[in-house]
Structures are given as C-alpha cells and as structure tokens.
C-alpha cells in the first residue's frame, strides 16, 4: 500500500512516498523498518506507543494504535504534529 | 584506596590540535583550533534542527564521534561517525527501555542526555544516561545499546528517580557516568534528582553516596533520602581518581575516597555570588584545581549569572579558597545560563576553559580562565561543550 512520509523522516526514505505491505499498521511499520532501518523507532517508542508528535492516518482517519487492520488498497499517511519552536 | 595528592606530569597532547564539540538545541558544530588556539574553523551544522544533547569524541581512537540527538517530532537516537563527522550513520539499536509486561506501564526514552566512553583498555565500550533516567551500555562502539545494571527497573531506584515532575524542566536525567580508570567494575553515577551512587561490582549492586550533601532547606526534607538530592555535575580528577568534585543544586562539594562524606567546599565562595551552578570542571593534571560557573539560585531560581555578570571561579587548593575569573567577559547585563555540560577544559600545557551559554555564545578562557574571548556567537542555545586533542 501507499505510505506518505513526512519531511522529518525522508532522511530514511529519500522520498515522500513509498510502498509497504502488512495486514495491520504494526506489520506495515515492520515492513518499513525492513526497508529503512531505524525509521520505526523514530515514530514508535519501545512500548509500541505512537510518539507524542507523530500522527498516523489511514484513509484520512487517525489511527490510535498499531493493531489497526489494513487492506492493500489503504493509504497510510504519517504526519509530524506541531512540536514547538 | 590510598589517596595520592600530586601535581603530576600526566599524558599531554603535545602539538596536538584542540577540537571543540558543541551540541545545541538545533544541531551540532565542531570547532577546529589552530596550533595556537587563536583561530577556530567551524564545521557545521550537523543535524540542523535536531536537539543534540551531547557530542563526544572517542579518546581511544581520536576519530569516532557519538551524538545523542532527537527532533521535536521524532524519537531519540544516536548518530555515529568514524571519520570525525564527515559522514554519519545511525545506531542500529539506540538506548531503549525494556518492553513492559502486558498490562504494566513501561517507560520510553525521551532523549539520551549523557555519553561516556569506557576506560582506555575497554575499547568500543560506551555508557549512556537518559531522560527519563536510565543507564545503558554499548560494547560495539555505540552501534547497539542495552540496558545496563539493575538501575532501570529496580523499584528502589525508580522511587528515588521520582516522576517527570521531580526532575529538570525537560525531564529527570541520569548523568555524570564515571568509570574508575583503574577498575572497570567501579562506577559512579548521578541522578537529577536521586543522588549520587557507586557500584564496585560492575553495576550488579549500588550504594548511595550522599552523606554530607545538603538538601533544600525549609521543607523538612530528609537528607538521608536520595530522592531529595540533586547533583548537577560530578567529575573525577584524572590524575587522582580518588578525588571527586561536585556541583550540586545545594552547593559545591569535594569527596576524597575512601571517605564517603562530601565536604561542602562552596561555603568559601563569596556570599553575594553563592555556590549554586550547573557545571563542574576539573584540571587535567592538578587535582587541587577546579572551576565552577555560578548562577543565581535565589528566590525563583533564575539560573542566570548572578547580577548579570558572568564569571568562572577557580580553586587551586581543593576548595579552601576561590578566585573570580571574569577578565574579558561582559561586565553587566549578561544574563547567561551555562548548563551542566557546557563548560570544559582542554588538556594543553596552558589549559584553556570553554563555556557555551544559553544565548548561543562559545567563549574561551585562556591561561586557565584568566583571559576570556568569544569564539562564536549566534549559535542556537548551547547544551554541551566537550574538548578533544587531535
């Protein structure tokens, strides 16, 4: 599925859009990590929580945790939320 | 352990050049000095926009750099360079707490605050202190990190560490990780808050080292409880590893082992300046010489230079007396904050001091702080300054 990458994470992907696969959001993030080592920990902490200033949207709806099921046609958008100056 | 008081001729850098490693709220810079330390070449920014808490050169190989970094959006990581910053690679496994058991609340590292290389003999060993407070170790030069010792999950330490509300404004910190150069199993660590602790068995067990340290007066705090202690910076003297100096939230202290009782040497500081501050710097060769950079710890704790007049203070007799060092520094209306990692000494024959402040200025104090001049202005808020000899 299509995954949109925010500018803060493009040092890993070198582009704003990539493809990843998985039946859940957790699996998609594992797939991203496989292709771009280090990217997952910048978004997800060691307790599998989405970090405070990261938002993940699936087809325009905000995902609350990593167990969310996904379909190959879904679009995942990773967003960097406002975090101060 | 017998204390040996001396002014020894220890390892000197010879004609080696001095490198300054400057970590800031928005990136990192390297400043390469010429042989006379008169001109400085800026190399940076590295990681522009990242909060860089600490940037340290491995003294064992003279080329490996570790940078503790995060951004406002992203989680913390460690960047590593093996060519003095020409190229960087991210750690494969940065410091991270263990995953909590199902149903338990686990902690996550907000940022790595302190990086400390292991002993000269223990190549590739590094230690890291984090916020919230945790202790980590790498055995492969900073590529992968593992929780170290019992501290991170020990219920007693967790009580002493307190919560987010018990630490500094951007989070409680584990810092001042010191490995005894004679014994790789002998450690000191400090926690803000949570006191100073020592292990003599490689981190398997720890004992508190807080005797003699004062706590904030007027609230009935029990000085026997580590929770109430806030050591800001602890340093071990390179040529006398039985002597430690400490700048604390409540004064300046010295500890001569095997004694376990800190002596408040800051009481001999001028009353109008006081003995509150963040950094503590020891001389590379003379264990009787140390420096502090006092701050205003009155009323609401501005943490700025007392009276708007920045100055370092030096003792040359282990804290019996102190002298003010402000020649060349602003004479008035300079409200600096100098954080705990923001002051360092080089190891040249004529030692120079370096200070980074909250206003993004980097200063050099030649002749052990006698003559100050500004090396750089307009940097982001400086979080740490380290020196290295190349």
Image: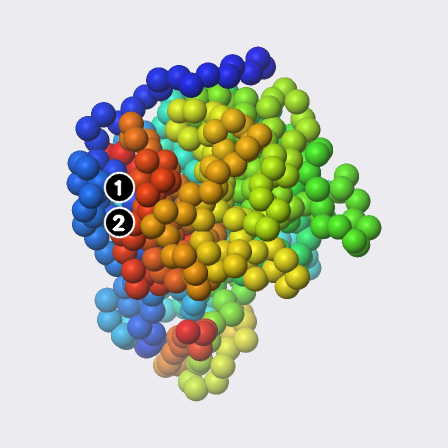
Residue nearer the viewer, B318 or B63:
B318
At x 54%, y 75%, the residue is A64
At x 29%, y 44%, the residue is B20
Q: Which residue is mark 1?
A: B19
Position of the N terminus of chain B, as image quadrant, is: top right
At x 75%, y 50%, the residue is B217
Indicate which disc, 1 or 2, sits on the residue closer to the N terminus.
1
Q: Which residue is mark 2?
A: B30
User: Is disc 2 placed on a helix, strand or loop?
Assistant: strand
Check the image and report above or below for B336 versus B369.
Answer: below
Q: How is the image coloured?
A: rainbow
Please, which chain is the residue tagged with disc 1 on? B
Residue B300 locus on image (x, y percent)? 64, 63
Is residue B372 visible to us here? Answer: yes
Residue B314 locus on image (x, y percent)? 47, 37
Tag 1 near tag 2, CB within 8 Å: yes
Q: Residue furthest bottom?
A: A60
């Amino acid at each position: 599925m299509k995954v949109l990458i925010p500018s803060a994470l493009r040092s890993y992907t070198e582009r704003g859009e990539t493809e990843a696969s998985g039946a859940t959001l957790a699996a998609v993030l594992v797939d991203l990590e496989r292709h771009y080592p280090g990217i997952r920990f910048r978004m997800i902490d060691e307790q599998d929580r989405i970090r405070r200033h990261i938002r993940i949207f699936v087809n325009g709806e905000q995902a609350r945790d990593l167990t969310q099921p996904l379909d190959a046609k879904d679009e995942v958008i990773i967003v960097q939320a406002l975090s101060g100056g | 352990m017998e204390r040996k008081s001396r002014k020894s001729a220890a390892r000197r850098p010879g004609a080696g050049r001095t490198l300054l490693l400057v970590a800031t709220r928005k990136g990192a810079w390297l400043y390469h000095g010429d042989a006379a330390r008169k001109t400085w070449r800026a190399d940076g920014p590295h990681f522009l926009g990242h909060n860089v808490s600490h940037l340290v050169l491995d003294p064992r190989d003279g080329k490996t750099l570790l940078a503790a970094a995060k951004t406002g959006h992203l989680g913390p990581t460690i960047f590593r360079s093996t060519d003095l910053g020409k190229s960087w690679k991210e750690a494969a496994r940065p410091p991270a707490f263990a995953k909590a058991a199902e149903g338990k609340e686990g902690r996550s590292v907000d940022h790595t605050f302190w990086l400390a290389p292991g002993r000269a003999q223990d190549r590739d060993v590094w230690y890291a202190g984090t916020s919230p407070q945790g202790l980590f170790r790498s055995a492969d030069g900073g590529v992968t990190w593992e929780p170290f010792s019992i501290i991170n999950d020990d219920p007693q330490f967790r009580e002493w560490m307190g919560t987010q509300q018990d630490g500094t404004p951007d989070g409680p910190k584990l810092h001042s990780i010191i490995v005894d150069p004679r014994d790789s199993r002998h450690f000191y660590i400090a926690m803000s808050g949570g006191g100073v602790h020592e292990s003599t068995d490689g981190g398997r067990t720890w004992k508190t080292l807080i005797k003699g340290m004062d706590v904030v007066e007027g609230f009935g705090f029990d000085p026997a409880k580590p929770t109430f202690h806030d050591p800001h910076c602890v340093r071990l003297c390179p040529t006398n590893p039985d002597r430690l100096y400490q700048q604390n939230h409540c004064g300046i202290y010295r500890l001569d082992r095997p004694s376990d009782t800190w002596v408040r040497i800051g009481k001999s500081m001028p009353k109008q300046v006081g003995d509150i501050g963040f950094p503590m710097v020891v001389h590379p060769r003379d264990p009787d010489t140390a420096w502090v950079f006092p701050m205003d710890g009155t009323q609401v704790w501005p943490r700025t230079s007392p009276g708007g007049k920045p100055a370092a203070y030096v003792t040359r007799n282990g804290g019996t007396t102190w002298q003010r060092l402000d020649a060349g520094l602003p004479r008035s209306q300079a409200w600096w904050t100098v954080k705990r990692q923001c002051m360092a000494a080089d190891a040249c024959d004529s030692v120079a001091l370096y200070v980074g402040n909250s206003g993004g200025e980097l200063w050099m104090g030649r002749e052990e702080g006698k003559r100050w001049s500004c090396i750089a202005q307009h940097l982001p808020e400086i979080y740490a300054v380290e020196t290295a000899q190349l």
